Image: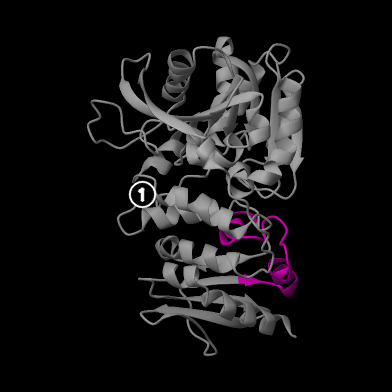
Amino acid sequence: MALVDQLRERLTQAVAAPEVYSLARGLDCTVAFSVAEQDVTIVCSTEGPQVVATQLVADISLSAPESAWHGVLAPCPKPTYHSFSSIQLRNPNFIVTGDALVIAQARAFLEAVFAHLNTAAPARSEPDLTRLSGNYHRVKSAGGEVCNIYAEAAGQGAPVLCLHTAGADTRQFHGVMCDAELGRDWRLIGFDMPFHGRSLPPLGWDGGAYRLDQATYLDWCGSFIAQSIGEPVVVIGCSMGAGIALALAAERPDLVKAVVALEAPLRPRGRRNSYLTHAKVNGGWHSAAYVRGLMSPSSPPEDRRRAAWIYSQGAPGIYDGDLSFYSDEFDGEPIAKRIDGSRIPVHLMMGHYDFSATVADAYALAGWIDGATVTEMPELGHFPMTENPPRLLDYLRPILAKLRP
């Protein structure tokens, strides 16, 4: 079968998927997929998305040579061929054109289309959430703010603090926290940062735009450890949680026994864009789509869908406000150089499908921290604890075994 015909067949199947159809609601645009000057066109209208034979002027166009489209249609595409956002932002073999607002409005739909172009569909496993116990902690920051912070815990033993990613909450770590094997030696604890998940804004919030900075982030994490846990912890953080875990080791070594940094960035500039908080863009759909593009196509589709679902539930502007810290402020170099690796072990774990924090970032950070290790996870993306918990646990258990008291 000619490649353009294969692409047409895959796109026809993709737009018939329930979630693709659902995410096309309200869209009025035309998307062209161009292979060697031949177009396969999707029209989104009130009737839903359809692949049409007629050549139309496209609002959004994705153009690439046949070799690049072969990469997209592979059973498990390689990194930067696996999602719309990775292609748009990181793959030089593709030319993506279109009005930025229209692309933002269509991003959730386009990510869902790409997720349905391939056949890999591994089964998922459901964590035993009955192992969790949760309650609120009244925490006062060093700056004097008071917040009722929601936290969950499972297992018994030395404390491990799990720090969620930008715009999300502790549900991301359920697959790790509820692991019975880890729970025999560790008490796994996670909390929702103020403004996130089940933690409301601090008392006295005036409704202004939320913006997270490193000093405030350190304050809340340090205050929670000191007031709610009461002893030093092993910190497992992902993405911005990995960044602040490293900052805690550098600035508050009295509170940290070790760091396991999942998808730790170096200088992740460019993650923010003006459509993350925009009156003409569905914030829930867009934030979820933006992170969906960072996950591996080999991770179970239902787990990827649930990982995106957490983002779709974030309050307006929270993901964007977190990226003020993660994308605009954070610089891993001076932080890494201040960590005493002989006192605080640091383990960096990186998925190959992550184009926000890369494997190269991890090796750069490790070069500045005495004794730091890097574990590459070729089949995982930016949210390993959520998109494929069993596979992450295969990598994580040996590391925690070395850290066991």
Name the residue type under label 1.
Thr
| 373 relative to 238 in the view: left or right | right
Q: Between 57 and 348, which is closer to the camera in this rendering?
A: 348
Residue 81 placement (x, y as % from top left): 67, 61
Q: Residue furthest bottom?
A: 54
Q: Residue at x 34, y 46 (%)?
A: 316
The image quadrant of residue 74 is bottom right
Q: Name the residue rendered at 39%, 79% in the picture.
A: 45
Query: Horizontally, is 34 left or right of 106 in the view?
Result: right
* Neighbourhood count class around disc 1 (C-alpha, 10 Å): few under 14, some 14–19, many 20 upward: many
Residue 190's spot in the image, x, y percent? 50, 30
State the residue position of label 1.
277
Tell me which colouring the rendered structure shows.
Answer: one colour
Along the line of sight, the residue nearer the viewer: 71 or 130: 130
Location of residue 237 (image quadrant) = top right
Q: Can residue 109 be seen in the rendering of this structure? A: yes
Residue 304 vertical position relative to residue 154 in the rendered view, above or below:
below
Which residue appears farthest toward the front when viewing the image? 130
Residue 129 image point, x, y percent:
52, 41
Q: Secondary structure at mark 1?
A: loop
Query: Magenta part of the protein: which range?
Result: 63-90
In the image: residue 41, left or right of residue 4: left
Q: Quadrant of the C terminus?
A: top right
Residue 43 higher or lower than 400, as above or below:
below
In the displayed structure, 91 sits above or below 113; it is: above
Question: What residue lies at 64% left-to-right and 35% top-to-bottom?
Answer: 180
